[in-house]
Image (cartoon, grey):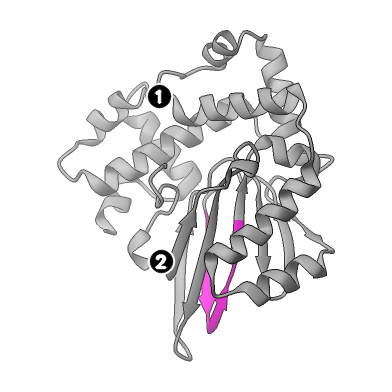
Amino acid sequence: MTDPHRGVLYPDRLPRFTRLPPGEAAAELVEWYWIPQWELPDGVESRQALLPYPAANLAVEPDGVTLWGVTTRAGERVLRGSGWAVGALLRPAALLRLSAAPADLADRHAVLGEPALQAAVAAAMPDPHAAAGIVEAWIVDRVGELTSEARLANAMAGLLMTDPTILRLDDAAARLRVSARTLQRLAHRSVGLPPAAMIRRRRLQEAAQRVRDDPEATMAEIAADLGYADQAHLANDFRTVLGLTPSDYRGAH
């Protein structure tokens, strides 16, 4: 499985956190389930900066069920008191059926009227495996049979987010044997971001992890290894999306 802390900018500040793979029935619909649980003293806050995957999330919490669209910038979640969430990082094939317009959900969310799902998950907590199983059954039932377009969307997202040799839209289009225009339209309909933005997100996540985990690596080395034109382009991506420089991020650890 992918590094469970990839996309989490300060993993040492996490509450109790469980990440679970999907079952066989949901393997084409969910990347993984994420389940934080926390119990904080009065007046104490836990702040966690995130650089999420370019994907939507279904989140079940004590107060309801929410479909969160893809994000374009780093964000922050502030935890207080006690609570939990059971989330599913959705693959494009699932989002195609759960939202009529994924691009309209970018940096936004939609509250879903699913009280039965919320009640069932709440009853299963604090058992993360049982709660994830309930969410999985709901997603599988709601999505139904996958189309060829849905499977192509999954293949596109998997390629853009895991293959370090894919640096341009044309690279991905050639690998998938479709036109660049087809890939652009598919990303708009099934993710809500252009393919180029997905590639940039992957490289920035990899860069953040390298900056954090490899203190001996220079910024120039990291930039070169990840396909950036030069160190300045890496620094610009950090500032634009994360709001700080690579050196400032390294210094925070």
Q: Is residue 55 visible?
A: no
Residue type, label 2: Leu
Q: Which residue reaches farthest left?
A: 216
Splitting the image into 4 quarters, where does residue 137 fall? bottom right
Q: Position of residue 155 (x, y in %)?
A: 60, 24
Q: Position of residue 230 (x, y in %)?
A: 33, 24
Above-or-below relation of 172 to 224: above
Rendered residue at 69%/48% (across/down): 69
Of pointers 2 and 1, the one earlier in the residue sequence: 2
Above-or-below relation of 249 to 1: below
Rendered residue at 41%/47% (across/down): 6
* Magenta span includes 89: no
Question: Could you tell me which secondary element the residue under label 2 belongs to?
Answer: loop
Q: Position of residue 50 (x, y in %)?
A: 48, 55
Callout 1 crowding tier (Cα within 10 Å): few <14, some 14–19, many ≥20? some
- Viewer-side residue, 182 vs 108: 182
Q: Main secondary structure of the magenta part?
A: strand
Q: CA distance from mark 2 to mark 1?
A: 28 Å
Residue type, label 1: Pro
Callout 2 crowding tier (Cα within 10 Å): few <14, some 14–19, many ≥20? some
Q: Describe residue 92's horizontal placement relative to residue 224 as left or right.
A: right
In the picture, the quarter occupied by the N terminus is: top left
Label number found at residue 97 = none
The magenta region covers 75-87
Splitting the image into 4 quarters, where does residue 238 fall? top left
Q: Position of residue 200 (x, y in %)?
A: 49, 31
Question: Disc 2 marks which residue?
Answer: 14
Question: Disc 1 marks which residue?
Answer: 164
Q: Describe residue 60's horizontal placement relative to residue 209 as left or right.
A: right
- Viewer-side residue, 131 vs 74: 131
